[in-house]
Amino acid sequence: MPSKIAQIRLVSSHPEVYEPCDDSFALVDALLADQTNLLMYNPKLCMEVGCGSGYVITSLALVLGQGACGAYYIATDINPHAVRVTSETLEAHGVHAELITTDIASGLEERLAGLVDVMVVNPPYVPTPEEEVGRDGIASAWAGGENGRCVIDKILPVADKLLSDRGWLYMVTLTANNPSEICLQMRDKGYASRIVVQRSTEEESLHVIKFWRDSDDILQANEVGAVNKTGPARIFESLLSQFPGLLFGRNSNSSST
């Protein structure tokens, strides 16, 4: 199915804002790979946490065909420069989203609780010293603290609170983040998972993981190859099989890769 996504030449920029890179492209590719499901799903409220340049939220609006499905878009970023740049990127593509300068979803959690149908996140996932997390400017886009998990571990419970009963979360993770452990944590909250895109570069190995509540319909179970394996345990087994070398006994090794 042909689809437009944000054009790099129309993406605005600023020295203190993270520009689209391999992780951004992987996340948009995941949305394209899941486009048929997204269009059938017909989400009403879509949200990006950490919008940066606006490349991803703009692409999501274009993938869904803003106006066609009646979706409403919200994007947040702790960096005020990113919010301005995202506004320019959206305007250049003729799409709209409500933009809020805030840390993750601070100040929005009560109003948006249980309402978000699709959430997309390219979090700060790079392992760094803890003191680099949350700094002003562009460093906030990548500094993830120990194992790159500091911000990710703050986002997950927020996502759980904001997602609707049928909500989907697409998140970029790095091998060093121990994605199998992230999936275990989300399983404890009642979510099944699958890798939508897996990509290796010279510098990193990326996974875009889709999470959804186990109460979703049988179509979601089919997506992870579980047509004849109903039940959360079977679905999770299918996910873990996609993470060779990252299972429970190897957590300490994966954190140093």
Image: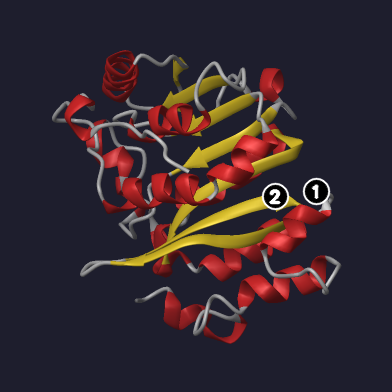
Vertical comparison of 164 with 176: above or below: above
In what quadrant of the picture does the C terminus appear? bottom left
Furthest-left residue in this view: 15
Q: Nearer the viewer, residue 75 or 89?
A: 89
Corner quadrant of residue 15: top left
Q: Residue at x 79, y 68 (%)?
A: 227
Q: How far, Cα to Cα, is label 1 from label 2? A: 7 Å
Q: Is residue 71 left or right of residue 13?
A: right
Q: Nearer the viewer, residue 186 or 197?
A: 197
Vertical comparison of 121 with 228: above or below: above
> In this orientation, does residue 255 appear?
yes
Position of residue 120 measured from the top left corner of the image (x, y, whole percent): 51, 40
Furthest-front residue in this view: 1
Disc on res. 212? 2
Q: Is residue 199 left or right of residue 230?
A: left
Q: Amino acid at mark 2?
A: Trp
In this rendering, the count of numbered labels is 2
Vertical comparison of 174 with 108: above or below: below
Vertical comparison of 68 with 174: above or below: above
Q: Residue at x 61, y 62 (%)?
A: 194
Q: Residue at x 48, y 80 (%)?
A: 252
Position of residue 69 measured from the top left corner of the image (x, y, whole percent): 61, 22
Q: Is residue 42 left or right of residue 107?
A: right
Kind of element beneath mark 2: strand
Q: Are circles 1 and 2 on residues that touch, CB within 8 Å?
A: yes
Q: Amino acid at mark 1?
A: Asp
Disc on res. 216? 1
Badge 1 density bin: few <14, some 14–19, many ≥20, Cα 10 Å: some
Q: Residue at x 63, y 24 (%)?
A: 45
Position of residue 197 measured from the top left corner of the image (x, y, whole percent): 46, 60
